[in-house]
Image (cartoon, helix red, strand yellow):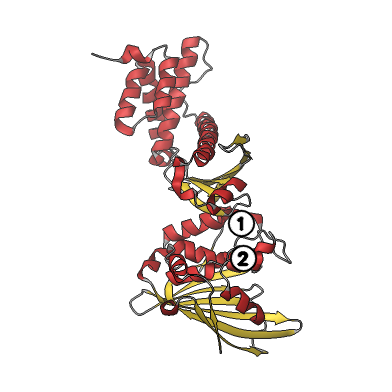
Amino acid sequence: MKVITVEVREDHLENLAQTRPLVALAELIWNALDAEATETRVEFVENELQGIDTIRIIDNGHGLHYEDSFLVFRNLGGSWKRKGKRTHERRRMLHGKYGKGRFRAFSLGNTVSWHSTYKDGSDVYRYHISGDAAKLGEFSVHNQRGKPQDTSSGMTVEIGQVSDGAGVLRGVKAMEDITNLFALYLRQYPDTRIVYDGIPLDPVNAEHRFTRYTLDPMVMEGGERVTAELDVVEWNLPGKRGVVLCDENGFMRINALPRLHFRGFSYTAYLKSEQVAILDREGLLETGELYPDLRQLLDAARAKLREHFTLREAEEAQDVIDFWKESSLYPYASAPRTPAEINEQRIFDIYATHLDRIFTDFSTVSLRTKRLVLRLIQELVHADPVRVASILDELITFPEEAEEKIMALAGIHPEETTTE
């Protein structure tokens, strides 16, 4: 057995070992993908009390060569990945460059061991490295052995004495977060498989729609001309939303706007730019919109998302109206002839499709009930569209922009509706 001592200040290692559990686990998965693994499995071994006893990350990548382990584990920031942007054989984009993932593993548990199986020519070797949080920065390398029974290469990272906070890594929310993190990568490399807690990540089937935009060039405060892309993924499952900042290759750096909500849509927007990686290296991403360059990027994302979801809402509304017409549910039997009839029908379309989006139960009621509700809405619109908007706003917070549009169609200015 040989001992490796890391050549870096101890307080820096302690900071790395206090990373949030999801970030730490994601780093270990990225390490597997950077080693050209086509399958990576994350397993949680339970104890008798159904808590987590052990976490394992198992991949079929190249493993780590015995001789390379001494350089890799001794020098923080000495990763081979800094020499290039792609893996050697599959030419995948590399995620890690600074060798921090192995230290962040200690935020998941007090003991970590790396079991490497690698090929050297026609020979296969196996060895393992172990570390303990009590001696952070010191690793034991156990002698390699040739000709193991399983000759396939790969790495297994095993984490023991798991911390209490690791419980957040399981469950529906954890699965959604991991899917968000690796969605773009798995889309780009469909031959890659990640199995998380027994369930394969499948972002493509979880997607409802994918749209990519090239944003207009932006000039930063320092005069740099910055380009960016915005990938908008609409999900089948409800409840997802937010703008994720990524480098130019789509690797997530931070969830910048987790509460940016567009009614009726479950989405993740990935803002990709080389400028994001630069701001991350400078430690500026955490400042949020206090930093002008970052605020400009996020403002551009917001504007494009407003445009995107306005169009998407119009598309979905038209689909609903077409269905009502095909099913003889639409209360207007003929095309409008006068400007007043045109406006009335437009106002009805806004009300009715909005209610259809808000009340999901509406789609499951009988055709007779739908016909009755739509007919009642038609009568209310014909009698007093502004009053209907007031009722809807009171009951379900009718969107302000929709209410303003209705008032404009009805020929009413906002000041005319005010009361003393």
Camera-side residue of 382 and 326: 382
As drawn, the residue found furthest toward the right would be 121
Task: Please indicate, yes or no, whether residue 170 appears anywhere in the rendered image.
Answer: no
> Can you say which quadrant of the picture contains the C terminus?
top left
Mark 2 residue type:
Leu
Q: Is residue 319 above or below residue 378?
A: below
The residue where tag 2 is placed is 33
Question: Circle 2: is it few (<14), some (14-19), or many (20+) Cα within 10 Å?
Answer: many
Task: State which tag comes first along the sequence, 1 or 2.
Answer: 2
Mark 1 residue type:
Tyr
- Element type at mark 1: helix
Q: In the image, 263: left or right of 149?
A: left
Camera-side residue of 298 and 99: 99
> Can you say which quadrant of the picture contains the N terminus?
bottom right
Question: At 53% from the left edge and 17% from the top edge, which residue is drawn?
Answer: 335
Q: Is residue 278 above or below residue 140?
A: above
Task: Please indicate, yes or no, whether residue 298 appears anywhere in the rendered image.
Answer: yes
Question: At 41% from the left edge and 79% from the top edge, which residue is drawn?
Answer: 134
Question: At 59% from the left edge and 53% from the top edge, which residue is drawn?
Answer: 184
Are the two marked residues, 1 and 2, in contact with CB atoms closer than 8 angstroms? yes
The residue where tag 1 is placed is 185
Residue 260 point in image, percent of width and height: 44, 41
Residue 75 point in image, percent of width and height: 58, 72
Residue 389 point in image, percent of width and height: 35, 23
Distance from Cα at disc 1 to Cα at disc 2: 10 Å
- Element type at mark 2: helix
Residue 54 point in image, percent of width and height: 44, 77
Camera-side residue of 187 and 101: 101
As drawn, the residue found furthest toward the left would be 420
